[in-house]
Every structure is written in structure tokens, then in C-alpha cells.
Amino acid sequence: MINLEWLRTFKTIYERGSVTAAAEHLLVSQPGVSLHLSSLENHVGYKLFERRPRLLVPTERGKQLYNAIVDPIARLEEIEIKSQRGASGDRPTITLGMCFETFQLSLEAAVPDLPFNLILEFGDYRQLLKKLEDQVIDLVVTPHSPELRGIDYERFSQETIVLVAGKNLGVSGFDPSDPVALREWLQQHPWYGIAGDNDHMLRFWKQNFQSSPDFRPNYIVPNFHSILRSLSRAPGLAIVPDFLCREVPGVTVLWEGYRPLVNCLHFARQKKPPHEAALQQITELIRQRMPPIQGCV
């Protein structure tokens, strides 16, 4: 019989694009993720991914398996979340969805002192909001605010998506006054991106050049903090939220674009949520560490 953890690990690798990103999401070691994948491939008798540098590309059989198991695994995960209880029956359990970087910046240090149980989910905003709508998640921090049944949004912060340069990157040829020359200059340097999440880069490029980027990043890493740590040591370019990079040594905010790309950040929750006091405490902690709203609409 197939071990269900092998399938959960396979699903995460498929969605995250690499063993490193899957391990970070599942909070397990990279060797453990690799072992689950190899065990599953040995069990089914065929390769599920093509191995490429820093990236795993699903094979056709891998795509078929993913399509077969993605909905059942998601339902099992929802049942697991709903049925979890803490050591004390008096402590409520709050499930929070947000991006990894925002969690690290605003909430991570406060976790040991929270008077309730906390389950963190990191992932695509659309998936997190769908779980909120289905009452699997209690609160989502999101830059998107689609109309969903029973969901209220509260704007509390904003981020500007900016182009940053790494340590010792020569910028003598950087000239935004000539868009054609600027695009050529940008493509002459190494780029960093995030596995499975190019939304910021796509939107920044379309807003400033009215097209999608016609190149792939040279280095695909798990998250924005990985990008900034790399850029603090070596030259390169990336597109990141401004509040993450203002105080990173060696990293320079190079350009906000011809017209700044600003995201409003929202708290999304049920209109009549349970555990209101716990949610209020979480939102206040996050609000204290995030940039204030400055005319975001």
C-alpha cells in the first residue's frame, strides 16, 4: 500500500517546484523529502520528475498522478486541520494563511507567547482564500481581495514592488529614460526568482514594459529572503516587495518603475469569525511590524 505521506510530499514538490521548497513548506529535512519521492517512484515503477539544476519538472506520468491525487489529498488535509486539538481543550486553535516572509517579519518572534494554538499555512493566495471561504482557515493576509461569500477584507498595510540590485553590481549603464536600452541592460545581468511564484515579476514587467519578460531567472530559490541573502553577497537583479529589502546590507533599491506598482495588504476573515479575540491579537501583532497605509486604494 502507498504511504500517504509519500503522496503528500509528491504533491508539495509538484506545486513548489523543488525538493528545497517542498522541505521548507513541510517543515522537514531535504533528505526526508528526497527519500519520500524515491520511495514513491520505486513503488509506482516510473519517474515522476525530470531532474534539472535547482528544479524538478513533472513527467507525463507525474502529471497524471498529481491530477489523480490532488483533490483527495487536499480533502484529507482539511479534515486533519479541522480535527486538530491542542493539549488543553480551553485553548482555541487558529489557522492562519500568509506568505512566509511576512510571517517571519511580523509574527514569528511572538509565536511562543501566544495564548492559543496556531497553525500556519503558506501557499498561493488563491488557494488560501478558497480555504478561508470553506472555513478551513480563520485568517488570511493577502494582497488580493476578490469578492467571496461571507468574507470581509480590512486594508492594513501596503508594499511597493521594486527592482533591486545585488552587491557590487555595476549600474553605470542603467538608464530608465530609454525603455529599449533599459530592457537590454536588464537582460545582461543574472536574475533571481522564486519557484512557482512569478506574480510580482510578471506584474512589474507588464506595468513598465507592456509585455511579459522574455527570459527566465538564472537562479530559482525558495523565497524572497533567499533572494536577498544571495544578493547581499553577489551581484544580480530581482523584483521584490520594498519593505523586505530596505535594511539588507549590499542590496540597493534600483528602480520603482515608470509607475510604482503598489499592493494593498488585507486581513481577510469570515464576517462572523469564531475566536474573535485571538484573531484581534494576531492582526494587531502583524499590523505593528508592517508598513502603514499611505493612500493605497
Image (cartoon, rainbow, N blue to C red):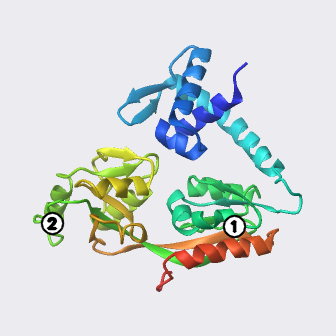
Residue closest to the far left? 172
Mark 1, Cα crowd under 10 Å, few <14 / some 14-19 / many 20+, is few
Q: Name the spot of residue 148 as percent of width and height, x first.
A: 69, 65
Left or right side of 40 for 257: left
Left or right side of 136 for 238: left
Q: Name the spot of residue 265 as percent of width and height, x first.
A: 54, 72
Tell me, yes or no, if residue 271 can be seen here. Answer: no
Secondary structure found at label 2: loop
What residue sits right under mark 2 in the picture? Answer: 174
- Height in image: 199 above or below 45? below
Q: Who comes first in sequence, dot 2 or dot 1?
A: 1
Q: Amino acid at mark 1?
A: Asp
Q: Amino acid at mark 2?
A: Phe
The residue located at (30%, 53%) in the rendering is 213
The residue located at (75%, 56%) in the rendering is 134
What residue sits right under mark 1 in the picture? Answer: 113
Mark 2 vs mark 1, foreground winner is 1
Q: Name the spot of residue 155 as percent of width and height, x first.
A: 58, 78
The residue located at (53%, 62%) in the rendering is 104
The residue located at (46%, 51%) in the rendering is 197
**Quadrant housing residue 74:** top right
